Image (tube, coloured by chain):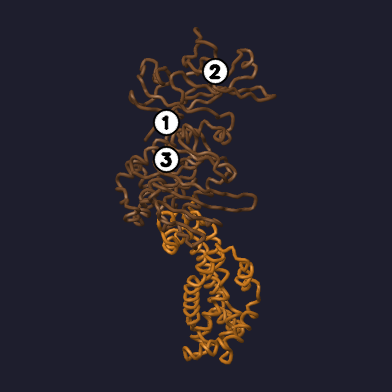
Amino acid sequence: MRLAIALTVRRPGFTLEIDETLELAGITAVMGASGSGKSTLLRALAGLDTPQRARITLDGALLADSAAGVNLPPHRRGIGYVFQDARLFTHRRVLGNLLFALQRARPANGGRSPPAFDEVVVALDLAPLLDRRPAGLSGGERQRVAIARALLANPRLLLLDEPLSALDLKRKAELLPYIRALPGRFGIPLIYVSHAVEEVAQLADEVLILAAGRVTARGEAHAVLERPEAEAVSGHFEAGALLRVSVLRHIPDYALTELDLAGQRLTLPHIDAAPGTPVRLRVRARDVAIALENIEGTSIRNQLAARVLTIDAEPAGAYAEALLELAGAPTQRLRARITRESVERLRLRPGQPVCALIKAVSFDRRELGERHG
Amino acid sequence: MGLDLGPVWLTLRLAAVAVVLLLLVGTPLAWWLAHTRSRAKPLIEAITALPLVLPPTVLGFYLLVLFAPGAPLGAAWLGLTGETLTFSFSGLVLASMLYSLPFVVQPLQGAFEAVGRGPLEAAAVLGARPLDAFFTVASPLAARGYLTAAVLGFAHTLGEFGVVLMVGGNIPGRTRVISIAIYEQVETLNFAAAHVLSAGLLAFSFAVLVLVYSLNRRFPVHAA
């Protein structure tokens, strides 16, 4: 699905200026700090706001063209929207909310027929909630209802505006698999807006980074998330890299799972995935240490052969960051946040073979994501 | 002493008709006030609130001038219906609508503002047209505002005196409402009848307000 966007939104002290053509498939994440224009972009796409300049086409269909005076209202755009605060209708029960969408479902939207009611209910586990009132639902349950409601209206494209931002970590982890499964299960592309790099790392196929109202980077998720523009969003503390690995075997006695990374082995707490399943692993720079050679007699299990690509030291600060390329997999990279003093003590320099040390416990299960597509 | 219940029925009929019409007229006005970004908003709000501060006799005086068969409005009405607006039930309805306008518009406006744009946007992206969203989302969410508006408008019209006296006079069966009847009984020193009517009005108003406040407790505002 091709989405061509050309728009300008001017507000006091802020300008959003975007000219991009996106090939939507799977999940496209729009990542940016708060105030970068993510929600503004999404609202303009849905027709909720009218930008000063806009030309938006979806698979050739004109949604807005300010020069020609065309501006389809939201109810005629055929685009679904899941709001940050769910916005369930509080005067209706969950079932009533779903029926509201079902009764207004577009019969054929860009060739798509509406999804079966029962399938949506099953996909989002809503059967036990149908008779409940929205006020009594948890944040995660509300978002599941909101997603189901959006799907039932049969949109061509589903926009999600930070749907997890109001949830705690546990609820986020519960909701992520539901979102990840949507494109495959319902054949619908998603645009997912977030400022949280962990969410984007798990969900996105493509990533677009926004800063101060402009696109600063875009491309495949693993490539974009390693770039400095991504770090500008997440901050140093959360900076890291994405590894593409696959499940090798489980070690049930110790509740561990062994993973394969281009012939090297990684061990981490049990993952619920069958051997052979490809998995994404986000490793934060602050969880990676560097040794000149393999170390025996340590509790650190994961020691990966790698080579230093670059070292970036803070001129007067305590820290430095090393970008490492893993042996046997030149496109797989790790970032290590170490002290500047260590760089000098170990005489680290580009090209040098090293050993990257990663504590097994530092792989948080929440940061696991299956790859799709 | 035979108590004349005529003024009671007339008053109830007047209040009911005026409130129903006011809800119809007041809804679009309140909706506009709740959602507009127009610069004219404070002006329209002030006009809407005028009956709150004006002495009813002032309002009644201007209405009497407007309703006179020689004035454009009065003449047009006479031409259309064959009836004058002054000293008639229709005139009283129109006057009551103006008199009770803020009591209907302000609760509705407050309710629409409380509902906000959020639920309407949610309805729109699900494919609901604006009118559809108004009837199926905004109105049910503003139900309490409607209840308050209806009750306040009704109760306020029941107690109307000055405007009626100016515009309607005291014609039995047409314009003699409860408050006028009470006034007349007192004038003729018939305190017993005045007591019955006054106590009835007091009890009725109290009962209505108790009903509203208990309904408000039973149906708390739906928090998002």
Task: Look at the image and tell me whether residue A272 can be seen.
Answer: yes
Of badges 2 and 1, nearer the viewer stands: 2
Of the two numbered discs 3 and 1 on the same chain, state the one appearing first in sequence: 3
Kindly identify the residue that appears in the image at 59 percent across and 85 percent down.
B66
Image chain in brown: A
Please rate how many residues cluster around mark 3, counting C-alpha atoms within 10 Å: few if below 14, some from 14 to 19, many from 20: many
Query: For the view shown, which residue lies furthest in the front direction?
Result: A351
Q: Which amino acid type is shown beneath numbered disc 1?
A: Gly
The chain holding disc 3 is A
Q: Closer to the camera, B176 or A18?
A: A18
- Tags 3 and 1 in contact by the CB under 8 Å rule? no
Q: Secondary structure at mark 1?
A: strand
Residue beneath label 1, please? A369
Residue in the picture at 36% in, 19% down = A250
Q: Are marks 3 and 1 on the same chain?
A: yes
The 10 Å Cα crowd at callout 2, few under 14, some 14 to 19, many 20 or more, is few
Residue A37, how many percent across, how many down? 56, 46
Kindly identify which chain the residue marked by label 1 belongs to: A
Return the residue nearer the eye: A150 or A329: A329
Three-letter code for the amino acid on which mark 3 is drawn:
Ile
Disc 2, SS: loop
**Residue located beneath label 3 in the image:** A27
Q: Earlier in the sequence, mark 2 or mark 1?
A: 2
